[in-house]
Image (cartoon, helix red, strand yellow):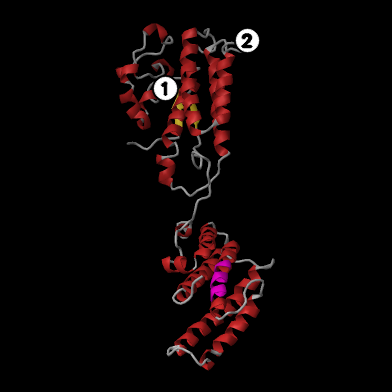
Amino acid sequence: MKRPKTELSAGSAETLRLEDHPCIDHRNKQNQSKRHHKEKDRPKGVKRRSKGRRCLPAKVAGKRRATSTLKVAPLLSRSHTPRLVSLWDIMEKFFAERFSYLGWILGFTEGFGTFGDAAKNALEESSVSYFIQHLNLAKKECEAIGLRVCVVHIDEIISTFDSPLRPKTPSGLAPISRELNANVARELRASQFFRLSPDTQFYFDKAEAFGPEVSTAFPGANYDITEAGNCLALERGTASVFHAMRVLEHGLRSLAKRFSVPFEHKAWGEVIERTEKAIREIGQQPNKPADWKDDEQFYSEAATQFMHFKNAWRNYTAHVGFKYTPDEAEAIYRHVRDFMKHIAKRLKE
């Protein structure tokens, strides 16, 4: 399949064949039985090509071609629920086909007002019917895409043909299509997207980003682990560090609990100091385990690391005036991840 183009030209029999667009070729096959148009229903000057394909008359080819450019900015999702989407999602699931088809329709209707002496000839009923038919096609695509303002706009355009504002000549159709085209572009610009960097996009919404052992040992930290990664992917360095420090809090609480040190509503410094004191007393316990030296080393290292985290990053993150770049935040994220994996070997919530 050829790549669909978003710049569409109308007004030339050689360039515009509405039903021959590559993205809607399958529609041609499905609708062959429905394309039995009577000659009397076709506007003057519009000829049928092979297998019912329509195009603008060849005599228009020498005139200035009307060009309709549709800037494609697909909606984030059908339900407008924020989530990560790939370029393939946008192309396959988020209306790439419909945007391309809509652009062809708008280009066709805009070029419709350039037939022959469009500014002099009277607008015939067959031409009006043909024009409205394609407006309804455009309306259907706008409804599917979610362009609600454009749906209302198309209804208003159709209603003008039953009012004194009805165009008197075919040339009056071109500005109507141009304004609709512009309105489509305006509504599409209302949806904006943030493209994740290829270098950090794998951090976004990653399940068990610190490993299954950390998720199992500290299930309460899963929210902040995910958010730390999301902020990193979105290049919000300070926010990522903030969530990473909250992850560490789950580890420190578990360490304090291991040595019966009160944690709730206590400052980190106080908790760490009291924990270190309890660790030093391991060797003095009468019922100490045979491998108490291993315990002493493991927990001493953990307590020391918590103090480093507190002095290096947690205290500064909790107050205004200090910021972290994405690169700094990524280094801290990895440090916290590796440390949480280490303490998950012996600690859990």
In the image, what residue type sits under mark 1?
Ser
Give x and y (percent) for residue 210.
46, 66
Q: Residue at x 58, y 79 (%)?
A: 260
Question: What SS does tag 1 mark?
Answer: loop
- Residue drawn at x 53%, y 28% as measured from the top left: 181
Q: Where does label 1 land, which residue? A: 12
Q: Earlier in the sequence, mark 1 or mark 2?
A: 1
Count of number-bearing discs? 2
- Closest to the observer, 1 or 32: 32
Instruction: Single out the residue that lies furthest toward the right.
Output: 320
Quadrant position of residue 323: bottom right
| Region of the chain picked out in magenta, as a range | 246-254
The answer to which image quadrant residue 151 occupies is top right
Identity, as a three-letter code, of the amino acid under mark 2 = Pro
Inspect the magenta stretch and tell me whether residue 134 lies in it.
no
- Work out whether residue 61 can be spotted: yes
